[in-house]
């Protein structure tokens, strides 16, 4: 196929796209292609609307916004939890929208890490996001345990992927708790959460997952898999806004477990304003809230999550897989001669929602892409991460990104930039 014919083919794919109407729901910058929705999802018109409505509620109602606002603030976290629940395969009561990714991890480890004599270690992996590791290290220190000896990190054989067999082999008798990513943030590998959960439970170990790169892109069945807990952020694939409030899941079998970090918003709602010094925790995941919710940061999620509710996660996943599959085909045809290596899983069952293209010049290739108004992100030392997002990217976007990358390589346009990362990458 000529390049022109390939672009025509991409346009035809867009014409058959069942989700194409959603692109207009988002603020896309004309002439620019956004491929970074796995770091910060874009603003939608609906999210803007629900944020502005909550702002007006504050303006017009003051304190009465808690009960009488268009989106009453007092129940807002619970309402958003119900919208998150189908995305993670949970009952509404098992989910809470609260805190942030790292804070929720602290909360869950403070709750579920119960070291005993001889079983006092936490198992994680060598490829996970640094904040998760920092949180686990500090939780160990708080218990008087040394992270050097008590945090076990399963190594990767190739620096890209984790082998479930290796993780299971590391589930030894001294492990009390396991925390792993659902989708690895660099390679986009999906771990087999069902298998890992079963293996952990067979050995008497609790297990939780970080869903930052999976929630809103990949279906989950946390409840049916029996996962003990999970946590995620709502600003990546869920488009809730920069730093918006995160999510957590606690399996119903743990309802009634006293949260490690308690605060008055974890109370039963009818009891909260009794102002009693004996807490009556909510009977469900609501107990894991700590303080007053960040209402203006929650508000955009109402509109953003409504779209996932309409479309359903299966349709999002189907389009996402088609986009990444198509991008991999184009990369193989057009970019492998320039030294790019596909560093994400090829198999649909193991591939998350982004491509991880490895190249020694990745840092400055990303800068050249930005110069061409294409927004990727760079992950040191050598990864160009590209996330074609189901709700707002097109097959034509994918084509144009690959064609631009090819031109950048052909013309050596990247050589005009220094091969080092920027402060925010
Ligand atoms: C984005 C991300 C985080 C970020 O945590 P915050 O507390 O929201 O800053 C943590 N873990 C993973 C795997 C992530 O992808």
Image: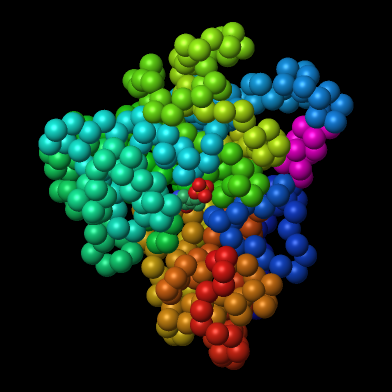
User: Is there any visible trace of residue 219 in the rendered image?
Assistant: no
Please report the bounds of the magenta region as a residue range: 45-56
User: Is there any visible trace of residue 54 in the rendered image?
Assistant: yes
Question: Does the segment drawn in magenta span residue 55?
Answer: yes
Give the side of residue 34 with respect to residue 115, left or right.
Answer: right
Screen quadrant of the N terminus: bottom right
256 versus 178 height, above or below = above
Q: Considering depth in this image, is 87 or 139 the residue closer to the camera?
A: 139
Q: Considering depth in this image, is 165 or 2 the residue closer to the camera?
A: 165
Q: Residue at x 61, y 33 (%)?
A: 309
The percent position of residue 41, horizontal first and vertical second, equals 62, 52
How many numbered circles does the render carry? 0
Question: Does the segment drawn in magenta span residue 104?
Answer: no
Could you say which quadrant of the image residue 69 lies in?
Answer: top right
> Residue farthest to the right?
60
The percent position of residue 123, horizontal first and vertical second, equals 25, 46
Give the side of residue 204 with respect to residue 294, left or right.
Answer: left
Predominant SS along the magenta part:
helix
């Amino acid at each position: 196929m000529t390049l022109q014919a390939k672009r025509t083919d991409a346009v035809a794919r867009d014409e058959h796209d069942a989700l194409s109407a959603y692109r207009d729901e988002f603020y896309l910058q004309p002439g620019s292609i956004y491929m970074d929705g796995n770091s910060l999802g874009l603003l939608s018109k609906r999210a803007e609307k629900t944020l502005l409505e909550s702002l007006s509620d504050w303006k017009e109602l003051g304190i009465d916004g808690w009960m009488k606002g268009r989106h009453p603030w007092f129940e807002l976290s619970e309402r958003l939890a119900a919208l998150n629940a189908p995305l993670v395969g949970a009952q509404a009561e098992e989910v809470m929208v609260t805190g942030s990714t790292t804070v929720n991890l602290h909360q869950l480890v403070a709750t579920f890490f119960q070291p005993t004599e001889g079983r006092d270690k936490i198992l994680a992996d060598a490829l996970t996001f640094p904040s998760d590791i920092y949180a686990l290290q500090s939780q160990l220190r708080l218990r008087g345990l040394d992270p050097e000896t008590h945090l076990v990190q399963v190594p990767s054989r190739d620096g890209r992927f984790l082998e479930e067999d290796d993780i299971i082999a590391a589930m030894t008798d001294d492990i009390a708790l396991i925390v792993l990513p659902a989708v690895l943030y660099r390679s986009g590998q999906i771990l087999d959460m069902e298998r890992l959960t079963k293996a952990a439970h067979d050995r008497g170990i609790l297990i939780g997952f970080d869903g930052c790169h999976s929630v809103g892109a990949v279906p989950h069945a946390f409840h049916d898999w029996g996962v003990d807990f999970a946590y995620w952020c709502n600003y990546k694939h869920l488009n809730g806004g920069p730093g918006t409030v995160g999510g957590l899941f606690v399996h119903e079998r743990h309802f009634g477990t006293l949260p490690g970090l308690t605060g008055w918003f974890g109370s039963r709602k009818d009891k909260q304003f009794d102002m009693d010094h004996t807490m009556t925790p909510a009977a469900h995941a609501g107990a894991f809230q700590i303080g007053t919710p960040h209402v203006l940061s929650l508000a955009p999620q109402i509109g953003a999550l409504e779209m996932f509710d309409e479309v359903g996660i299966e349709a999002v996943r189907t389009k996402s897989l088609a986009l990444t599959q198509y991008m991999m085909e184009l990369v193989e045809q057009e970019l492998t001669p320039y030294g790019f290596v596909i560093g994400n899983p090829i198999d649909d069952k193991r591939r998350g929602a982004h491509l991880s293209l490895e190249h020694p010049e990745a840092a400055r290739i990303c800068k050249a892409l930005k110069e061409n108004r294409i927004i990727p992100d760079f992950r040191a030392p050598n990864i160009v991460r590209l996330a074609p997002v189901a709700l707002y990217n097109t097959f034509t976007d994918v084509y144009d990104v690959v064609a631009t990358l090819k031109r950048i390589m052909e013309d050596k346009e990247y050589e005009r930039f220094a091969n080092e990362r920027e402060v925010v990458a």
